[in-house]
Amino acid sequence: MGRVLSVLERLDRRWVFLAMALAVAGPILVMGITRKTLPETPTDASRAVFNAVQRLPRGSVVLLAFDFDPGSAGELEPMGVNLTRHCALRGHKMVFISLWPLGGQMIDETITKVLRADFPNLQDGVDFVNLGFQAGNEQVMRVVLSDFPRAFPTTKSGRATADLPILRDVRSVSDFALLASVSAGYPGSKEWVQYVVSASGGKLPMVSGCTGVQTPQLYPYFPGQICGLLGAIKGAAEYESLINEWVSDPANGAAMEVAQSADGAVVVIPPKYLEAQRRMGPQLGAHLLMVVLILLGNLVYLAQRRAQRRAAA
Amino acid sequence: MIRLVAIIIASTAGLLMLLSPFLPALTSAGAQSSEIFNVIAAIAFILGAGSLVKVNLSRVGRRDAGWGYALVTLVCFAVTLVVGLGKVGVPPNPQFAATPWAGEKDAAGSAFWWIYEFVLTPITSTMFALLAFYVASAAFRAFRAKNREAMLLLGTAFIVLLGRTFAGVWLTSGFPEWASGLRLENLSMFIMQVFNTAGNRAIIIGIALGVTATSLRILLGIDRSWMGVGGGGE
Amino acid sequence: MLFALVVLPATTQANAAHQPAGEAATAQPIFAEGKGPLAGGVLVASGCIIAWMLLARSGAAMRLRRIPALDAVTNAVGRSTEMGRPVLFIAGIQDMDNIQTVAGITILSHVAKTTAEYDARIEVPTSRSLVMEAAREAVRGSYQAAGRFDGYNADAIRYITDEQFGFVASVSGQMVRERPAACFYMGCFFAESLILAETGNSIGAIQIAGTAESSQLPFFVAACDYTLIGEEFMAASAYLSGAPDQIASLKGQDAGKVIVGALVCVGVLLATLAALNPSSTTLQNLVNHLRGMLGS
C-alpha cells in the first residue's frame, strides 16, 4: 500500500492524461460499435426549452443567436442542430444571427446539415435566413432592441433584409416570438438577458443553451428572464431525447422522419440527431475518472499528513 | 497636456455611455460612441498586425529559440491574408453573377473555407479538448480535503459529477418516490438551482459594485494608472 | 459634452429622415420610461462611493484588510529577478471596452513599475491590438516613473491573435520555452484560463490571477498560488496605489453591498410573507409591484 501511495505521490501527470484519453475513447468506441446511447431523464430546465418551442403557434418567427465558435462546438453544436430541427419540425420560421466572428460559419454548417438535408422544401428568405455575424457585441443588442433591420441591413450572402418576406413584420427584436441563444461566452446569453430581455419588459421570451462553465452564471436568470436552459452537453442530450421521443410518437404526425424499416413503420433517427446523447458516454467515463482521481489524490494527501504527524511526534 | 486630453476624452465618453440608457436624447450619441470604439479597434488592428510581423521577423532573423514557430506564424498570416482578401477560389455569387469577387469569402469550396474547415476548426477543437486533460490533472493535484470547507466542496463535487451522468441515475434509481429528492440527479439540480444560484448572485452583485467603483474612479480622473503613471492618484 | 453637441444634431436629423411617412413626430420624453429604479440604484451606489471619497478627503482614516495576492506581487517579481527569468503578464483576452481589461492594465502599470525597479524583464502578450497599445503606454509610463526608461522594450508587449485558442497556444508555448518565474493573469478570461494556469504550474512559476469572470474563478483558485476573486480584482488598483480617496471608494463599495444586502433581506421577507398569506392583497400587490419595478 505504501509503495502504491508513493507512486501516486510522484505520478507524472501524463499518466493522468492517458487515463483521461482512455476514459473518453473507450465509450466512444463502445457506443460507436453497439450504436446504443444512454437513457436520458430530462430535467425541468431542458423540458422548459422543449415546451417553449412546442407551444409557439405554427409559423412563428424565431431568432436563433449562434454565439459560439468551433472550439465550443463539441458542447453547443448539438444544441444548435436540435433547436433548428425542432423549429423546422414545428413549422416555425428561423432567423439566424451571430455576434461571434466565426459564428456565421457555424450557422452555415447547421443550415446545411439540417435544413438543406432534411427540409429541402424550406426556402431561404421565406422560411429561414442567415444574417451572419455582426460586429459590435452589446451595441448590436442595443440597436436590435429598437431597430432590427438597422443592425442587420443585409444577409450573410449580401441580400437586403428589407426585401425578405421572413423579416417583413420585424421592426425590433420584440417582434420575434422567441429568442434562442446558443452561447459559449461573451457576448452571449448573459448579455442577451441584460441588454435585450430585461429591456424588452418581458415581451421577448428567451431560451438559452450554454457551455458547462457558463451554466452556473445563467441559473440565477432561470426561470425568470430565461424560460428554459440547456446546460452543457447534458442539457443538449436531454433536449435531443425529448425531440426524438416526440418524433417517435406516430400520433404527432412528424412525418418527415418516419422511415419504414423491415419491421414496419419504425421511426429511424438519423445519427446526426443522436450526437448529444452519444457524447454522454465519454462524459460518463470522464466524470467517473475525475471521481477516482479526486479520491486517489486525497488518499495521497492523508498519507502525507499522517507521515508528517509521525515525524513531528 | 496629453494626459489631460486623455482624461477628458475618457470622462466625456464614459459619462455619455452612463447617461445614454436613461436620457433618450443621448441614446444616439451613446450608440455612436460605441461605434467609434469599433472603428478605433479596427484601425488598431493594423498596429497589431504590424507588431506581429515585426516581432516574428526579428525572431526568425536572430534565430531565437523557437524561431521555427515564428516562421510558421508569418507564413500562416500571409497565406490567410492573401486568401481572404483575394477571395481565392470563391465561387461567383448567383445574385450578382456579373460582379467579380461578389461571392462570400468563406463560401463552401473556397480556399478560406478550406482553411476554416480543415485547419482552424480541428485546431481550436483540439485546444478546447485539452481542458479535459488539464481538469483531470488539476483535480488529482489540487482537490484535497484540507479542512471542513474543502470536504464540503468535495462532497458537492461528487454529487454534481455523478448526478450529471447516467452513473448518478443508476446508483440512486432504487430510491423510493418519497426520497426522490435524494436521487443524485435531483440533488445535483437542487445544488445548482439553490446553493449555486445564491453564491453566484452574491458574486455578481459584488462584481457589479466593484465595476461601479472602478468605473467611477476612472471617469472622475482619480485613478489614472491605466495611463501608466506608475501608481495613479496624481 | 462636446461630443454630444457635435453629434446629436446630426443624428437627430438622420433619425427624423428615417421616420415612416405619415407618422407624426412625437416629443421624446426627457427621461426613459421604466428606468427610474435602475437610475435610483446607480445613484445610490455611486453616491455611497463618492460620499466615502469626500470623507477621505476631509481627513477620515480608511482601513483596508490585507489582500495576500497583492502583497505577493513584490515577492513574485523579486523571485523572477533572482532566477533571471522573465515576468509574464496577461491582461485577459477581451478588448479595452471591457472594464476587466482596464482593471488589468491598471494592475499592469503597478507590476511594471515593480519590474522596472527590480530590473526584471516583463513580457506582455496581448489578444487585442488596442490592448497592446494601452499596455505599451502603461508600461512605458511606469518605467518612466521608476526612472528606468532605458529598460523599456516595446516589443515585449506584442499582439498575438484575437482567436482565443490561438492566443493561448502561443502563450503556452512561450511559457514552456522561456519559463517565466512569475505569471500574472489579470483580466477577463474564458476557457483558456485553465490551460494557462496548468501550464504555469508545470513550469513551476508563481501564479497570481484575478478575474471577475465567475465561471473561471474555480480554475484559477485550483491552479494558481493566489487568486483575486471578483471585486478584489476590481479593488486591486486602488489597493496598490494606497491613495486615500481610492481606498475610500472601496469603503463606499462595501456600503453599497450592505444596502443591497438589506434590500435583499426585505425583499425575501416580503416574498415569504406573501407566499404564506396568499389571501392578503396588500402583500401580493406590493410584491408584484416590486417585481415589476425590478424588471422580473
Image (spheres, coloured by chain):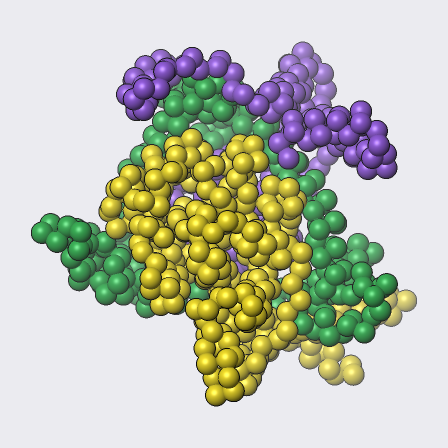
Chain colours: A yellow, B green, C purple
Please give left or right for residue B228 compared with residue C256 in the image.
left
Inspect this view and state whether residue C291 appears: yes
Please give left or right for residue C277 compared with residue C161 in the image.
right
Q: Position of residue A166 (x, y in %)?
A: 35, 46
Q: Position of residue C228 (x, y in %)?
A: 63, 44
Q: Residue at the spot x=70%, y=53% of the render?
A: B192
View extreme (right): residue: A313
**Is A12 in front, or is B26?**
B26
Picture quarter containing residue C3?
top left
Q: Quick check: C250 above or below B165?
A: above
Q: Position of residue A149 (x, y in %)?
A: 34, 37
Picture quarter containing residue A305?
bottom right
* Image quadrant occupied by the N terminus of chain A: bottom right
Q: Residue at the spot x=74%, y=83% of the render?
A: A3
**Is A234 in front, or is A94?**
A94
Q: Residue at the spot x=64%, y=51% of the render?
A: A216
Circle count: 0
Q: Quick check: C123 above or below C135?
A: below
* Image quadrant occupied by the C terminus of chain A: bottom right
Q: Position of residue A281 (x, y in %)?
A: 59, 75
Q: Quick check: A6 above or below C26?
A: below
Q: Residue at the spot x=81%, y=64% of the render?
A: B180
Please give left or right for residue C166 compared with residue C268 in the image.
left
